[in-house]
Each structure stands twice: as C-alpha cells, then as structure tokens.
Image (cartoon, rainbow, N blue to C red):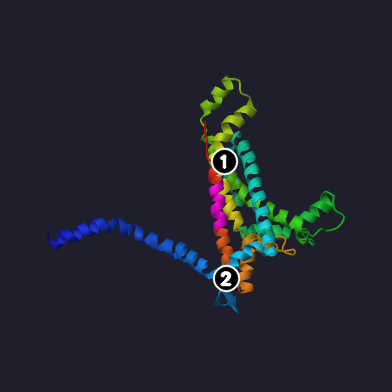
Amino acid sequence: MSIKFRIKKFIGRSYPVLLTLPAVIWIFAVCIYPTAQVIWLSFWGAERGRLDTFAGLSHYMRWFTDDYFHMVMYNTFYITFIGVALRLLVGLLIALMLVRSKLTNYLMPILLLPWSISGVVISIMLKWMVDPAYGLLNYFLMDVIPLLNKPYNYMANAETARWMIILGQTWGSIPYAAVVLVAAIQAIPRDIYESAQVDGANTLQRFRYITIPWLVPAIQYLAIINTVFGLRSFIFIWILTMGGPGGATEVYGTYLYRQFFEYLEQGWASSIGVFMMILNFIIVVIFTKTLRARVY
C-alpha cells in the first residue's frame, strides 16, 4: 500500500471530523469553557475582587438562608410566569382573529413590527410613557379620561412597577407568539373541522377537541422559549427600574450583575449563575413532560 493511498485514506476518514471541528471549537469556547469557569468560581470567595478564599459549598447553602435572594426568586417567578401566560393567551386570541381575516398576509408584517424593535428601545419608550412629569399615560388618565387628579409615579410603587415591566415585555413578545400560533393553526387539516361539523360539533367543541390539541407543540415551544428568556431578563428591567423600588423588581439578571460587578462578590454571583442554569434545565424538563404533544 503506497504512502499516497494511505494519506488519501486518512483524509477521507478525517474529513467529517475536520468539517465539524470549527463548530466543536466554537461550542467549547462560548459554552463549555464559560460554564465550567462559572462553576469553578462558585466555590471561591472574594476579597476586594480577588478570588483567594476557598468557600466550598457555602455559596450554595446561602441559597436557602438569604432572604433577599428569596425575594429575588419571587420577583423573577412573578414577572416571568405572569408574562408568559399573558403572551400565550393574547397571542392565541390574536392568532384566532388573524386566521379568520382575509387580510392575514397584509397584517402579519405589521404585527411583527413590535417584535423587531430592540428591547432597549421598548424600555426607553415605556419609561417615557410612564414618567410622572410628562408621561403619556398620566396625560391620558388625567386629561383625556379623568381618572386621576394628580400625576402618579408608577415606578415608585412595587406592584405597578412589576406590572409595567410585565406589560412592556409582553407587548414586545406577543407578535412572535401570534405568528407561531397562526402558522400552527393554518397547518391543521381543514377536513378534520369539516368532519367534526358534520358530526354536529359546535364552534367551542371544535376549538376544544381539535384546535387546542393540535396547538400543544407550538404552545410548548413558546412556553419554553419565553420562560427561559424571561428568567434571564436583564436589559429591560435595568433600564426601567434598576431593580427598584426597594428591590421590588430585582430579578436574577440584575441581582447577579450587582453582585459580580458592583459588590465584587464573584463567587456568590457565580453560584447564582449555576442556580439559573439548574432552574432553566428543570423548567425545560417539566414543560417537556407536562405539555407533551398529543394530537388526536
């Protein structure tokens, strides 16, 4: 066997590996190595920004004893899950209206406009709208519909601040949910509806026993995507409230940022990152198991 033949044979066997090597290197550089680094840092304490004290599992035990961390957990779940429920519900209603309209092809590009706007721009727009001095919302509620006697500072109240964040994030995310659900509804075979109608099923029954089961995969996908992105929300909340008032809108993203860059608690902040990874994994598994598609 000649050397030339051996070289060709080696290249032929190695060709698939060489093609996948750039992707493997990229995944290692941006996923595996940073994740391993975060896990490693979570076992160390920090003094003046230097990791010089081995902390063991103390940061992980702090998950169960830190009251402020528990409040951050509550805020994160509150804002995320209410927002996800609103996006799915409103997105489904819009999708049902669109599929019945003859102008669907013209309305879809318009519907996608809010989703195409940057989260930074949306948060700044919302911040201006709810400003107590010159915001559009106070003007509308005081002059157009006189429900208020004086300007109201929405970001100074914990509950209204949370709901402004939820509504702002929902407004920017509903279009994507609606488009996905429109595509899922249009993929349902029409003959199933016709057969059900012939058998005497009314509109509500057709929606309950045909539309909803066929939409389960799309709803599952949207629930997972919106939950994962909601749990790691940062920019929107940071621009609007920076976690205030009094930590009422502090979520994992803003809390981790403060601990790592402002208080230089890299070890504790890294353990929060590990907590978020575990939480995202658990939520994805739960959604996958409980919302498993069953199309009849």
> Can you give x and y, in whole percent of width and height, for residue 186 in the image?
53, 35
Question: Is 59 inside the magenta-drawn segment?
Answer: no
Q: Is residue 167 above or below residue 197?
A: below
Q: Which residue is mark 2?
A: 267
> Which of the 4 image quadrants contains residue 2?
bottom left
Q: Which residue is mark 1?
A: 181
Chief secondary structure of the magenta portion: helix
Disc 2 marks a residue whose amino acid type is Gly
Residue range highlighted in magenta: 278-286
Residue at the spot x=86%, y=57% of the render?
150
Type of amino acid under label 1: Leu
**198 and 106: which one is in front?**
198
Q: In the image, residue 174 lies at what x, y percent?
A: 62, 47
Judge whether residue 116 can be spotted in this image.
no
- In primary-sequence order, the first of circles 1 and 2 is 1
Q: Secondary structure at mark 2?
A: helix
Number of residues whose C-alpha sits closer than 10 Å to that of mark 2, classed few (under 14), some (14–19) or many (20 or more):
many
Picture residue at 60% right of the left edge, 78% below the top: 47
Q: Whole-percent x and y of residue 265?
A: 61, 72
Picture quadrant of residue 11: bottom left
Q: Residue furthest left?
A: 1
